[in-house]
Amino acid sequence: MKALEQCLPSIMNMSRAPRTVKKYDSAFCRWSKWAERQKVPHLPADPLHVALYLVYIMQDAKTVSPLVSAVWALSWKHDIQGYPDPCSNGVVKNVMQAAKRSLARPKDRKLSLSKPLLERLHRELSSSSLQDLQTLTLIVLGHSGMMRWDDLANIFVDEVAIKSSHMAVFLQVRKNDQLRQGSWVFISRWESDLSPVSQVEHLIEKGGHQGHVKLFGRIARVKGRTAIRHSLSYSRARELVRKALKRIGVNPDGYGLHGLRSGGASTAAAPGVPDRLIQRQGGWRSDAMKAYIQESLPNLLQVSQVLAV
């Protein structure tokens, strides 16, 4: 029994993703230090003390995010320890509602990369340069696969299966993959210069990839020729996309790598692709993907057009 009891904390931590556990631990540590300074118990916590702690955070907070982290961390810690959740108390809930109202800020959503924009980027980046080929491949694959940067950054060449009709990309870890079984993303081959399948084929052929290496990486000189080696960082990938947009005369300030993901979802939604398929393609865990879809004016006008008499 003693040995099993010692294993319990690590087992309980496995109920959440490692990043989430780390975030909760950090937020709970801040609460514990505050509670220690105030000479009040941190576990189990008194709802009134939790409410006062949230008011304390609000005094310097720029957004509601640190308060949300504190509430989720406290709720989870109490849950795994078998204590009542202090954050379900009405006082705490009302403080959170007040915080959301007073700290609310409009979200700085990045613009979607539309299909016409992709066509302009293709015309600009269709050169013999390996760097341009990699940038274009990253853009069209991120768009058609509706991928996060973490997805794109962890694609391995030997886990890409290219067929005559489509391409299957295996992602070892994805946010909606709660059981960590891996996830396949399927992308159709079509007759177009913008086909992601063709772009990936060209990149693998020209990039000198060998073995279990990442599809996207830094450009280096290898035995007198350029090749892709090592990993590509988020900041470098973002810089490449921004430079590509500047080259076609587009201000890159409103765009980010997430614009590939929202652009793919918006393009797929326009002709009526079912939500469940878009959700599956982009790896969304819920219908929160609808917030990423930017509707076109013709689609929005359909709502009133059906009312015409």
Image (spheres, rainbow, N blue to C red):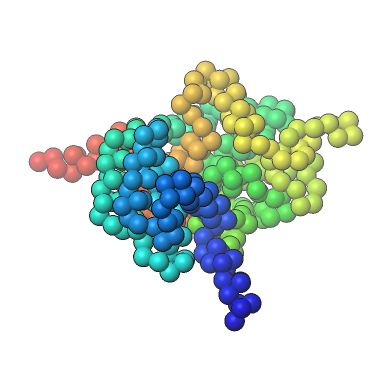
The C terminus - image quarter: top left
The N terminus - image quarter: bottom right
- Which residue occupies the foreground of this view, 159 or 256? 256
In the rendering, at what x and y percent does residue 203 appear? 70, 40
Identify whether 14 is placed above or below 190. below
In the rendering, at what x and y percent does residue 303 appear? 22, 42
Write the residue at 49% across / 42% down.
261
Q: Quadrant of residue 165?
A: bottom right
- Which residue occupies the foreground of this view, 131 or 81? 81
Identify whether 78 is placed above or below 274. below
- Which residue occupies the foreground of this view, 53 or 251? 53
Q: Residue furthest front?
A: 39
In the rendering, at what x and y percent does residue 42 appear? 44, 55
Q: Is residue 52 left or right of residue 171?
A: left
Write the residue at 18% across / 44% down.
306
Can I make out residue 296 in this image? no
Q: Residue furthest left?
A: 309
Write the residue at 52% across / 18% down.
249
Q: Quadrant of residue 307?
A: top left
Write the residue at 68% across / 26% down.
127
Q: Is residue 214 left or right of residue 5?
A: right
Q: Residue furthest bottom?
A: 1
In the rendering, at what x and y percent does residue 251 appear? 49, 20
Can I make out residue 149 in this image? yes
